Every structure is written in C-alpha cells, then in structure tokens.
Image (tube, rainbow, N blue to C red):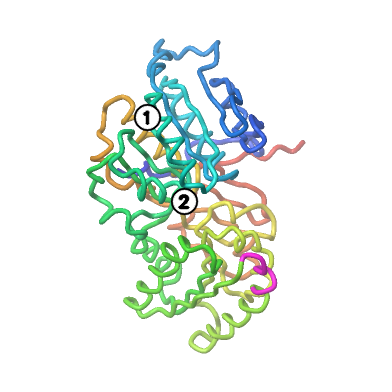
Amino acid sequence: MSFAAFNLITSTAFANSGNAQVAVASWLKVDSDVTEAWDAREIAPDRVRFVMADDVESADNSSSRAADKKVLFIFPKKSSAYNTALSTSLKVFADRGLFPEVEVALMKKDTAKRLEVIAAAEASKVDLIFATGSSSAKFAYKNYLGGKIPVVTICAKDPVMLGQMPDYDSGSGSNMAFTSLNVPVGLQGKYLKELKPGLKNVAVLFANENKSAIKTQYEPLVKWGEENGIQVLGVGVSQKEAAVELSKMVPEAVAQMRSSDPSLEESIFWVTGSTSVFREIATINAHSSTVPVLSVVPDVVQPGNDTAVMSIGVGFDSNAQLAAIYGVNVLTGKANVSDLPVGLVEPPDIAISFLKSRDIGMKVPFFFVERASTIYGNAGEIARSKGKNVVVSLN
C-alpha cells in the first residue's frame, strides 16, 4: 500500500494557518483542532485518555462507530514527532467517523514495565496498539511478535533495513503491521540522480549514537554508491558535541569532495534524521561552501536562511496518516494485520527553499517543483504548504 501522491497545486491556503498545539499533559501536546472532536483527560501521570467530544456528530450519523473499541499508543519518551503522529491519527479517525477510546501511555525504556502495560492491555481487551517510535517498534518486535493484540508501528524507521521484515511487499504473518519513515534507498537514489545527473559525491551527516539512522539512512546509501560509482562519505559526530564537530568535519568533507569535483557542482550533503545533527543546520550551512545541503527530514527546510535547500523524505504527519489508515482498516475488519505490507509513503515528501537555492546557485529541476508539497520562495517565505499555494497576508 502506498500513500496517495501529492498532486500539483489546485487550491490555496493562507499563510500561518497551521494548527497551534495545546498541552493535555506535561509530556503531551496535540493540534488544537483535535480538541474539536476529542475530549482529553489525564488519568494518570503517565497516561492520557481521549474520547469523542459530546457535541460531535458525523454527517452520516456514524460517529458512534467503533465506540466499543480500545486503542493504545505507546510513547517511549516525550517527543514533538510523536505528538504529530497522535494528532494526525486522531484526525484520521474522526474524519472517518470512528471514535474508539484512545489511551496514550508514556513508557520509559523499562522492559518489565512495558510488559506489564501490555499485559494490562490484554486484560482490558485493547483492540489495537500503535507502537510509536523506532524503540517501541523494536520492543514490540522482540517481545510481542505473535501476541494477542494487533500492533501497527508509527513514526518508526524502515523495518526491512532493520531486519524486522524480509521485504516491502509481504505481510508479517503475525500480529504486527509495519510502516516506514524512510524512503527506500533505490527510490531515494533515483531522486538524487534526477537532481544531479552527474552526481559524484554524497556526504552523509549522522550522529554516531543514532544506530537506527546509521542502519537505515547511511549504510544503504554506501551500498547504493558502490553500485552506482558514487563516493559516499560518512560524517559521524557525537550528539553532545555536534556543533563543534560539524564545524570541523563539514569543511573536511568539502575538501575531500573537491578532489573529484573541483567545482562542487556534482556533490551534496545529506542530513539524516539525527536530531542533534539536523538542528545544527545553520552550522552545516556555514561550512558547506556551495555544496547543496539536503535532508531526509522535511522540517529542516524552513523559513529564512537557516534551512536545507531541499528535503526528500517522509514527514511525520504523512507516515502517521498511513499508519492511522492501517489502524482504521484493522479496527473495522477491512484488513487482517498479518496481511498488511510495509506501509511506504510514495512519492516522498519534498520541500524546497528557493532562497537557499539562489544563495548557492543551485538550479531546481521542474520535476521537483511540481512534486513538492512545501515550497519557500526567493525571500524565504512560505509559498506552498501541504500541497497548496499560500496567500500571504499583508497585515
């Protein structure tokens, strides 16, 4: 199954029309419009429950569907990405007139406590678990594969590259269905070659401690580079010293690129999903010369100068929408969790900063412009958001 393609622009939206977030617990926020359809209550320091708001009624009077169902999201930590995943899922449920009782449990990386929570979920007859984040997905795979409750992974990295699934087309044959935050390396490579047909060098930036990013976003590119005659450089830094180390290692990578590409026109930097790395985008830009800085994380393309020139990846909301649809189909009996193939977002989310492309003299092929869901214009202002042209208010 693939997420529907983003189409060329057919409508408009207003700038700054994105959702604000509201706190429902010290560790959890949701988009403000979620509260139009759901009531939230903190039932324990580490647990929040969502139920259908009293005044909600769907157009087809189906708002009571799935009211007898129970859904559990397992969060391994406080995370803005997980907030996005939850908010998107709740909106997908509401849009389809499905209002199960949804609980979110904050579970630290304590195996015994996690097993207790799952045992309690079985006892209370939970119908579906969303394993949120790569660590939750890994835990479920190692400790609950074959369990009684269906599990869908959300906001988690590629299960094929992590050895959790043999391929993208098969179901697990068990109680788990997987989705992926990654773009398969073959498809990713095609996009990079479309951007730079004569590509010679890719320098991949990652945190040494982020093993899942190394496994799913660096090592596959190394293999792809070997198969395509492209030099892939690894730029690994420590999380705690990322800024200092990047300021030294990025110029070193530029110098290494110049040996095979003196003009730097056939080289790129590739920023992985390591938070400690992509939050240093200003540091990376300051030392990258004219080499384009791209990222797998759509949010690294942002207003102003502190931005990647382009992202080719999967947004947290896009992955969550796909995972939520998997969940809907499982809850309504339209699909068996064991049969669902790995959920991939295709085509990937593309974001572009024309301010940055102008600064470094990089031409953006129309191929990317027509497929981009997010575009920032020549002055760094938002010009397209969520696939829609933006009307900028003059006030």
Magenta residues, as a range?
239-245
* Depicted 10 relative to depicted 299: above or below: above
Please state the horizontal and vertical placement of residue 13, each as a whole percent of the image. Answer: 58, 35
Q: For mark 2, does the 10 Å Cα neighbourhood hold few (<14), some (14 to 19), or many (20 or more) residues? A: some
Percent from the top left, x then y, of residue 221? 40, 70
Position of 111 relative to 68 (above/below): below
Q: Quadrant of the N terminus?
A: top left
- Circle 1 residues within 10 Å: few <14, some 14–19, many ≥20: some
Examine the rendered structure and indicate whether residue 29 appears above or below residue 141.
Answer: above
**Front position in the image: 74 or 193:** 74
Q: Is residue 191 left or right of residue 1?
A: right
Report the disc number at residue 22: none
Q: Are marks 2 and 1 in contact (CB under 8 Å)?
A: no
Residue 100: x percent and y percent? 43, 22
The foreground one among 105 and 304 is 105
In the rendered view, tell whether residue 236 sits above or below residue 83: below
**Residue, disc 2:** 135
Q: Secondary structure at mark 1?
A: helix
Q: Mark 1 — residue?
A: 122
Nearest to the eye among marks 2 and 1: give it: 1
Q: Quadrant of residue 31?
A: top right
Left or right of 250? Residue 59 is: left
